[in-house]
Image (cartoon, rainbow, N blue to C red):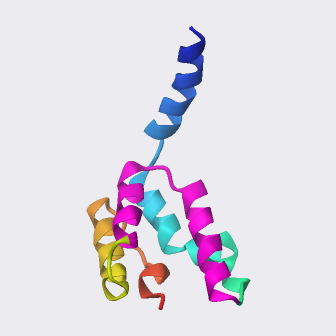
Amino acid sequence: MIRTWLVLPLLALLACANPAEDFENICHAEARSGAASIADPAQRALHIAQWVEANVRSSEAKEAMAALAGASFESRGELLRAAAREVGYTGDCPMAEAR
């Protein structure tokens, strides 16, 4: 019985994960995380990664982020845009343009 009470909130949280909203968050992660004001590129990247980890819940978005980690730097932007389109996010994506 106790396990059920522990698992149900987790399942409810996962069921509410919206991939399109997650990709919107990923695409705007630099601004939404507050990392835009961090001067050191390594610290800025770390801050964004931690923010994305804490704020992205859908399996589609998490799988896309894992795939991006192994992709060449030059292909990451297009891969991010393609993954976002697959789940219905068609808005702008500053992170796909980042260099």
Is residue 90 among the parts visible in the rendering?
Answer: no
Where's residue 32, x and y in %? 63, 71
Is residue 7 among the parts visible in the rendering?
Answer: yes
Where's residue 94, x and y in %? 48, 83
Location of residue 99 with respect to 25 vertically, above or below: below
Location of residue 66 with respect to 19 vertically, above or below: below
**Residue at horizontal 57 percent and vertical 68 percent from the top:** 49
Where's residue 90, x and y in %? 35, 71
Residue 38 sits in quarter: bottom right
- Which sits in the foreground, 19 or 43? 43
Seen in the image, is 79 located left or right of residue 3? left
Q: Report the magenta stretch's main SS.
A: helix
Q: Is residue 42 magenta?
A: yes
Seen in the image, is 84 located left or right of residue 42? left
Where's residue 21, x and y in %? 47, 58
**Which quarter of the rendering shows the N terminus?**
top right
Which residues, given as a range, are shown in magenta? 40-69
**Residue at horizontal 39 percent and vertical 49 percent from the top:** 59
Q: Is residue 52 magenta?
A: yes
Location of residue 86 with respect to 46 vertically, above or below: above
Q: How many marks?
A: 0
**Residue at horizontal 28 percent and vertical 72 percent from the top:** 82
Seen in the image, is 4 located left or right of residue 67? right
Residue 97 sits in quarter: bottom left
